[in-house]
Image: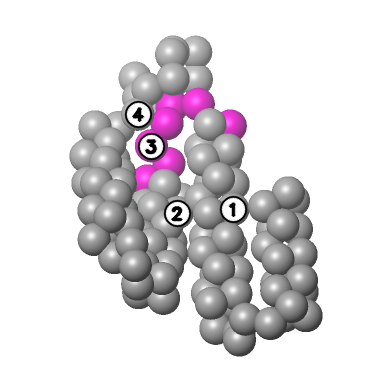
Amino acid sequence: TMRDTDLEIMFVPVYLQAHFLLKTIFCGIYVIFYQYNIVRVIILTAINIALLGLNNSMKPCSVSWVNHLRDAFFVHATLSGIQSLNYLAWPANLSTKEMVVSTLLSNIVF
């Protein structure tokens, strides 16, 4: 019954446990490493990649388009994290900020 598309949107319980455990770790890392941008962004990007892999491998929802939508959200979050690493790696001057901010906005919008 978990794969029946005529049912409500339901998720596999094992997936939900893993998903919310990773989200809890995500929140903890964000708070603990708030002042350490490089460390925080690297770990949070890795957690987003793990969430993407978990969602992509388990296909936890009984409605397939919801799985695709969640994959798109996690890809988006991962790209934003990678672009944030790019922004943190470059020296902070006006020309670099304009270039990196524009690519970050393009990742977020598209």
Give the left or right position of residue 30, taking residue 106 as reference. left
* Contact (Cβ within 8 Å) of mark 4 with mark 1: no
Could you say whether the residue bearing mark 1 is in a helix, strand or loop? helix
- Residue 29, by quadrant, is bottom left
Q: Which residue is mark 4?
A: 11
User: Of the residues shown, which amino acid type is indicated by label 3?
Assistant: Pro
User: In the picture shown, does residue 89 fall above or below 26?
Assistant: below
Q: Residue at x 78, y 80 (%)?
A: 95
**Whole-percent x, y for residue 106 in the image:** 75, 58
Q: Which residue is mark 3?
A: 60
Q: CA distance from mark 1 to mark 2?
A: 10 Å
Q: Residue at x 24, y 46 (%)?
A: 24
User: Of the residues shown, which amino acid type is indicated by label 4?
Assistant: Phe
Dot 2 or dot 3: first in sequence order is 2
Could you say whether the residue bearing mark 2 is in a helix, strand or loop? helix
Label 1: how many Cα within 10 Å (few below 14, some 14–19, many 20+):
some
Give the left or right position of residue 90, taking residue 54 as reference. right
Q: CA distance from mark 4 to mark 2?
A: 15 Å
Q: CA distance from mark 1 to mark 3?
A: 19 Å
Q: Nearer the viewer, mark 1 or mark 2?
A: 1
Mark linked to residue 76: 1
